[in-house]
Image (cartoon, grey):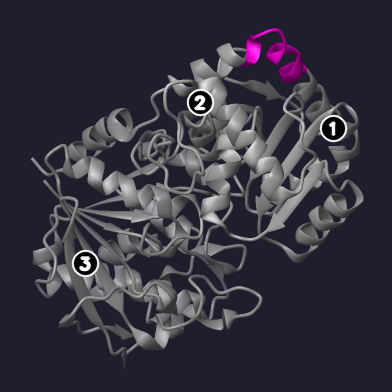
Amino acid sequence: MRVLMVASEVFPYSKVGGLGDVMGSLPVALSGKGFEVTVLSPMYRPTSIKIKGGREIRLELAGEAIPAKVFTQEKRGVRWAFLDAPSLFNRPYVYNDSDGDVADEHRRFSALAFTAIEGVRQGLFEADVLHAHDWHTALVPYLLRRYPAYREDPALSNLRCLLTIHNLGYQGVFPKEVLDELGLPAEDFNTEVLEFYGKVNFIKAGIVFADAVNVVSPQYAREIQTPEAGFALDGLLRKYAAKLTGILDGIDSEVWNPRKDKALKKKLTLSLDRWKAASKAALQEEMGLEMDPKVVLVGIVSRLTPQKGIDVVCEAADRIVESGMQMAVLGRGSEALEKAVRETGGRLAGRFAVKVDFDDALARRIYAGSDLFLVPSRYEPCGLTQMIAMRYGAVPVAHRVGGLIDTIEEGRTGFLFSPLTADSVVDALGRAREACANGGLSMLRKTCTEQDFSWDHSAEAYAALLYSLKPA
């Protein structure tokens, strides 16, 4: 079966968050199960792929020709394809942010969606199923069913679409005027198709027209059908509940392997406890924490955004360190939260260490050196950090939401708390610290490292879902 996956980021070629990790490993896992997988993503300037040649593709937005080529390479059993459209993607960032031009995000990723379908029409790709990921490519199923040139093309009539939503909090919502800019039918600006509180919503269009929709954990599939977690789309998701499923994400066991990880100063050999002790000492020294082998070290690797609950950590920080713990925090995000963690680190120097950055190597050393790993997300579709932490012997302490519920077993592989308040965080870390006493930490971390979060099981679920879409 032939699958064309379309995503805005793909590790190791481009990565901002967990989507990139998933797109670097799920295609490989499906290839191992007999699928012919092609992955299409943009060629960004910071991570430009050094490939010669490339094929031109006819690409238009509202009648305007967009100069573009598609480059491909075969690796790990997958065909990786990159859209080189310099006017849209030759920039020093993956996504537009406060330092970039935010005016054309809809054009950039609509072009990616059009490229997926045009690639099939023009013979660049072969596919039975188009697999779109998140809002950036959620127009793929809509375009296939509603764009005049595509819905009348018999060569596309047998194509099926799967939409995977990695985070419903990001929906691709734009002013009504983008319809003209993208050449989309004006009659589709209605509540049944594109309209969303007077604006255009890409993810809504994908949900309506995809043959199947999945999110990245079973618990999250239930949560997003409620007003509390549905981001105003809960009614639509309940309407289309019959085609909605939850499949837990996995992690690449080779990419996240403490026995081979080149970022670690000391790799895991025979003794887990001795390795953790050495890794903690190295982390304390690297981040300027007080050198104390007995203190419980709590790690955080996270985007510094409201979703991730970092504001609550800052509120609880004084009580956490006063209880005899240390914290090591790594991440980047909003200006306000970056300022908050820096101020907290300055006030609690030697006990609350902070690095505001994207630093993959340091992240791995935090996983290795931490005793506990805090995940205080307000909502969490799946979460990969708690899985990675367990693989590196750090016991997760997490808010009781989404995929955190599906991956952490209370008292056995971690600790869950609710509600998300400073009091709850302090209490949960206290419970974890008590459980770690008298040899308990050794047992907990051993159990954590024995968990299998590889893609094997999740890829089987994706395989079954994809096969269910293939025309008889």
Q: Nearer the viewer, mark 2 or mark 1?
A: 1
Q: Amino acid at mark 1?
A: Ile
On the image, the x and y values in percent for residue 138 come to 39, 60
Residue at (39, 38) in percent of width and height: 251
Q: Amino acid at mark 2?
A: Thr
Q: Say which of 140 and 72 sits in front.
A: 72
Residue at (63, 53) in percent of width and height: 303
Q: Residues within 10 Å of mark 1 (few under 14, many from 20)?
A: many
Reading the image, the residue beneath label 3 is 151
Magenta span of residues:
431-441
Q: Say which of 214 and 148 sits in front.
A: 214
Please determine whether, in this image, residue 402 is positioned above or below residue 71: above
On the image, the x and y values in percent for residue 152 come to 17, 69
Q: Is residue 123 visible?
A: yes
Reading the image, the residue beneath label 2 is 407
Q: Nearer the viewer, mark 3 or mark 1?
A: 1
